[in-house]
Amino acid sequence: MSHTLRAVADGSEELIDSKVEVHDRKQFELKLEYQPSGLDPQSQYLVEMLLFVPRSLNIDPATWSREHFYRDLHNYVRLKTPVLSFDELLSGEHSPLVQLERRVPLGLLGPVSEVIYDAKMLACVVRGAQRRFARGMRRECRQLLRGAETDQCAPPESPEQLLALARGSVRGTQEVLRRFRLVCAQLVAKYPLGDRAAAALRLVDEYLSLLVEQYFRRIVVQMEAMPHNGVYTELRRELMDVVVADEQYRRLNGLPSVIEPEGDNEDYTQRVGFLKKFCMNILFLKVQRSAQRKAWEEMLFALAAGGSMAFALGVGLFAQSRYPQASFNFFLLAVVGYMFKDRLKEGLRRLLSDYAGRFLYERRTRILDPVTQDEVGLCRERLDYDDSVVVPEEVARLRAKDDQVTVAQGELAESVIRYRKKISLESEMLPRLGDGLVSGVTDIIRLNIGRLLHDMDDPEYELDYVDLDDFSVAKLRMPKSYHVDVAFRFSVDDGAHRRTTVQLTRLVLDRNGIKRMRELAPETVVTQTKPVGAPADALSRAV
């Protein structure tokens, strides 16, 4: 489930793109892409996630504390991968491949780290191009199949369009690989790069080869429902020829990233994961977390201690003025004063902590450029439970469309957890792409829902069934599941562009984890502000 917010300013620019999906049986993932317009020095994003959990799962601040929730929450922040087509990769001014090639004849090698950076960036950009190619092929295949299912003949040029799209990607990919391998050989032969840099170039070469194999094989699998004759068979063979050629290339170079149909391929999966992390780590930003709320709470606790001490001291001075210090009455008042002082201190601590929780964020994260150490942005997070949560009206309205949810809100108890994340990005600190646009930031949030599974019943239960023909009795085994609604609220403030949207999904869980995710309500714009100077019709198109 993917949605995009757009604003109108010198064209149509993405402000925020959201994608919610199941990552594995125990985790779901929210992927956000922030794209500042660059018109305002600072862009602010507010992400709210509300979990509506049935009380039967026994979730409250004691069973799923703030510390454990943040421990189950995994966050990754990186720069958005630059978007370049194969033509731009081969000849564009800002193509990492072109920049690598320029270092050879001019003798402008520069720092070795820049060579490695360009090579890794090439792998990231090629991965993005291959992903867009796979999506385009899937879309074309679906259109052709939809035409066949509705007894409508696909346009005559459709198969040719499919073939042209695939062949364009094949040619572009092969040319990128050829030129990259050539420039790597020239750099290694001409300059003393060192063992580390030479190994990095070989790893990038291997990853590029694996990308070709993975995406081209995936496209052939997607074409399984297409006819097995004519241009479709020809296209399958062309794609698989490239896959086999690159697999043979890795085999001849003694690389372990070759699939063995009869083996367990453990080395292959480990190698693929390692190469992906190695090449994409240049995009990840550095984060420095601190407990913002804790520092303020310590100050408030000091005030609580001072107030209770003032009370105890007042009682002591009163007792001293009324009774001799050696008397029983003085002793009794001093003890009672200390007792009340101790309880007053704890009561003030709880009161001030609850009060601070309404306004203070619990975690503060600085987002830094790992190279320059400049602060790119600031992130603040907080967590609220049940009575502290005010469910936004637009979220409650979306949930009210379901009778089951309506009853649960009124008669059946449920626990509500709200996670809020406020991000401020400094546009001037973000790198700019070749066309002058500010580079976006990708924010990946994964939540492990393992704690929700602790108090679930068995995933199946039996039901007696009577056959109406012979009245025989049998046992039917039926799956048992629990529904957890998850609402998302995204707010953007980018100068004149302000937008708030909501989205509602449902997690279907059993004791083994997440069975599936359903979209109850697609992302809906609830508030918006017209950009300065934008015509009304353009704004309506943006919505």
Image: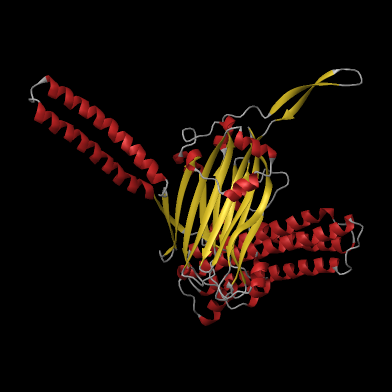
Viewer-nearest residue: 125 or 98: 125
User: Which residue appears at 90% of the width and 59% of the height?
Assistant: 229
Percent x, y for residue 521?
Answer: 67, 50
Residue at the far front: name it.
322
Q: Is residue 360 above or below residue 499?
A: above
Question: Can the viewer see residue 291 in this picture?
Answer: no
Question: Can the viewer see residue 143 in this picture?
Answer: yes
Viewer-nearest residue: 79 or 121: 79
Badge count: 0
User: Which residue appears at 74% of the width and 29% of the height?
Assistant: 478
Q: Quadrant of residue 213?
A: bottom right
Left/right of residue 326 with respect to residue 315 in the rendered view: left
Left/right of residue 205 with respect to residue 365 in the rendered view: right
Q: Is residue 188 above or below residue 387?
A: below
Percent x, y for residue 314?
Answer: 17, 35
Q: Is residue 359 above or below residue 105?
A: above
Residue at the far bottom: name it.
106
Left/right of residue 388 with respect to residue 145 in the rendered view: left
User: Which residue appears at 7% of the width and 25% of the height?
Assistant: 324
Percent x, y for residue 488?
Answer: 58, 50
User: Which residue appears at 81% of the width and 20% of the height?
Assistant: 474
Q: Is residue 489 above or below residue 24?
A: below
Percent x, y for residue 9?
Answer: 58, 73
Task: Name the image quarter holding the C terminus.
Answer: bottom right
Viewer-nearest residue: 502 or 126: 502
Q: Quadrant of residue 228?
A: bottom right
